[in-house]
């Protein structure tokens, strides 16, 4: 599994659905560089079980992301037509109607490969034929990307394990606090807590007070 933290987030152009039902060609994260932080997350498949709980939970917290000037973007290996159908299915029928942030189509699986979250890999068998080993879907990867397009945080869950959206917000707060104040955020830090100066004196002061 690649560690992308500290590196430029892999860019792409792909079909996407935005605003709950509008098709966009050549959607790219590049549009946010210099303007917004980005939470870019992968999920395995449309019309499944854990995935809608995460996707709807992100939508329910969109006010929190927006007031922090953060774009939320989801991605799976489904087609943009599948995204559209799911976005237009009522929640009581297993849909995610009401979700407004972009969902990217990674039908070719190249975006998942570039972020190293594909739950398998292509290989050549004994007969010289290409085959896929593993599951041809994305793990539950999440990448926090700063305004310069650099990955500052990543977490990857196995397929059955849903993520904490509150933790994603906490990491946004920690990054933005560091960017604005230059102080680092200790264990279990949350917005409103004391941070500390990243030197021996600062650490000693923080520990003595806590």
Image (tube, rainbow, N blue to C red):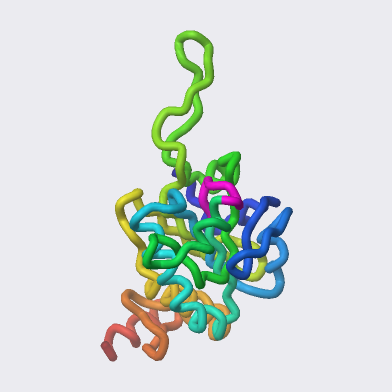
**Residue found at x 38% / y 72%:** 167
Is 158 positioned to the left or the right of 126 in the image? left
**Residue found at x 56% / y 64%:** 73
Q: Of all residues shown, which one is farthest toward the top?
A: 127
**Residue found at x 38% / y 88%:** 194
Q: Which residues are magenta?
A: 75-81
Q: Nearer the viewer, residue 25 or 47?
A: 47
**Residue found at x 60% / y 51%:** 81
Q: Where residue 108 sits: x, y (%)?
A: 60, 39
Q: Nearer the viewer, residue 163 or 14?
A: 14
Q: Quadrant of the N terminus?
A: top left
Q: Where residue 43 sits: x, y (%)?
A: 45, 54
Q: Where residue 148 sits: x, y (%)?
A: 67, 67
* Residue 208 covered by magenta stretch: no
Say if residue 186 shows up in the picture: yes
Corner quadrant of residue 55: bottom left
Q: Quadrant of the C terminus?
A: bottom left
* Residue 77 covered by magenta stretch: yes
Q: Nearer the viewer, residue 100 or 182?
A: 100
Vertical relation: 35 (above or below) 83:
below
Q: Nearer the viewer, residue 145 or 161?
A: 161
Q: Where residue 198 sits: x, y (%)?
A: 45, 77
Vertical relation: 137 (above or below) 19:
above
């Amino acid at each position: 599994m690649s560690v992308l933290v500290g590196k430029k987030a892999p860019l792409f152009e792909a079909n996407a659905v935005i605003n709950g039902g509008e098709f966009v060609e050549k959607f790219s994260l590049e549009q946010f560089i210099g303007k917004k932080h980005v939470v870019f997350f992968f999920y395995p498949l449309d019309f499944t079980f854990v995935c809608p709980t995460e996707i709807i939970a992100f939508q329910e917290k969109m006010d929190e992301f927006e007031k922090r000037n953060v774009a939320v973007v989801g991605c799976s290996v489904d087609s943009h037509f599948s995204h559209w159908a799911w976005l237009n299915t009522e929640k009581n029928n297993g849909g995610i109607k009401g979700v407004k942030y972009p969902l990217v189509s990674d039908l070719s699986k190249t975006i998942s490969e570039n972020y190293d979250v594909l739950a398998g890999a292509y290989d050549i068998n004994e007969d010289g034929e290409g085959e896929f080993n593993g599951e041809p879907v994305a793990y539950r990867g999440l990448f926090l990307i700063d305004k310069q397009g650099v990955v500052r945080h990543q977490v990857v869950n196995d397929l059955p394990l849903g993520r904490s959206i509150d933790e994603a917000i906490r990491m946004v707060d920690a990054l933005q606090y560091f960017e604005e104040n230059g102080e680092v955020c200790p264990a279990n830090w949350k917005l409103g807590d004391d941070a500390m100066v990243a030197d021996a004196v600062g650490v000693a002061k923080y520990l003595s007070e806590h």
